[in-house]
Amino acid sequence: MRHPSILLLGGSGFIGTHIAARLAASGRHVIVPTRRYNRARHLQVLPTVQVTVADIFDPAVLDRLLPRVDCVINLLGVLHSRPARPWGPAFEHAHVALPRLLAQVCARHGVKRVLHMSALGAAIDGPSMYSRSKAAGERILLDAKDLQVTSFRPSVVFGAEDSFLNLFAKLQSLAPLMAVGGADAKFQPVYVGDVAQAFVDALDDPSSIGRVYELVGPRQYSLRELVRLAGEYSGHARPVIGLPDWIARLQAFMLEMLPGPTLMSRDNLDSMKQDNIASGQYPLPPHWQPTPLEAIAPEYLRPST
């Protein structure tokens, strides 16, 4: 085992929880920093995982944590930000400034191995702030001198705790119909267990250094089809209506203004101007055999009895 100790940034989230479990199962020591202990307390049952309350955007905190590990996995990402050019402040903070800080602190402490979560379709000239900022952060790490970086670009990720299919299932349990912007946008959903395994497999694989891998499932769907499947699997199938772009943007603007978590933003719609499917520009991981959505989603979306 070449990298027995890992700093897992974003380890308390949906994908991070699965990666932490697989790293722990392989016997690796995993440090998961979090600002709020309650968000990561579920990881404490894993015997080799250490949860620590810390602000990873503080250089002094990273200076304290980096000497204790030999690899960093960065999963930090946000879905929404206040509009700005080329991207908003929340995207700058999480997607660009953090990779820049991480490259500096890794160099300072001689930590070379970095696995990074980017996004499918990330492009510096992409249609959304999200895609542009994701591309910028990825490029900072790949260009960093002496770092051994592998970057992953997943499509939308599904699994029992996801906030994608579960959201559409919940909405259909409450509403008589679904009015959806970007209904014809294409996605290639990938199972969270496959994403987690791709990270673990790459960790000690020298052939993955400097690579960017696309992570996609075996089938493409329109957003309309995914919403319909979520309704069917959850027992709350509703008619799905695609909205014209101008109405979709008005709907997204209104949702941005509501208190609480943002369900949809204008930047999300901008992201869907580009299909979220394999581009062929980057390879799939070696021996990639993705799990079909139909083999997993019906189990966790099925109504409880």
Image (tube, helix red, strand yellow):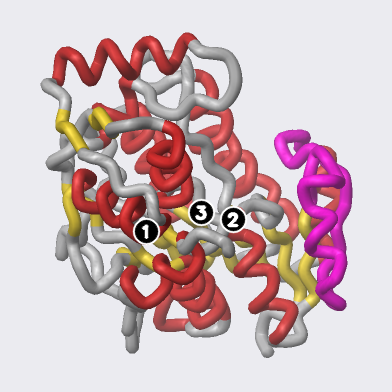
The answer to whether residue 146 shows anywhere in this view is no
Per the model, the C-alpha gap separating discs 1 and 3 is 14 Å
Amino acid marked by disc 1? Pro
- The question of residue 35 being in magenta is answered with yes
Q: Identify residue for label 1.
A: 154
**Label 2 crowd bin: few (<14), some (14–19), many (20+), radius 10 Å:** some
**Label 3 amino acid?**
Asp
Mark 3 lies on residue:
162
Q: Residue at horizontal 61%, vertical 65%?
A: 112
Give the structural element (helix, strand or loop) at label 2: helix
Q: Are marks 3 and 2 in contact (CB under 8 Å)?
A: yes
> In the displayed image of the protein, which residue is found farthest to the front?
305
Whether pointer 1 and pointer 3 mark residues with C-beta atoms closer than 8 Å, the reply is no
Q: Residue 119 location in percent, x, y?
A: 37, 50
Q: Quadrant of residue 260?
A: top right
Report whether 230 appears left or right of 59: left
Q: Earlier in the sequence, mark 1 or mark 2?
A: 2
Which residues make up the magenta segment?
33-59
Give the residue pinned by disc 2.
14
Tag nearer the camera, 1 or 2: 2
Q: Nearer the viewer, mark 3 or mark 2?
A: 3
State the residue at coordinates (25%, 28%). 179
Q: Amino acid at mark 2?
A: Phe
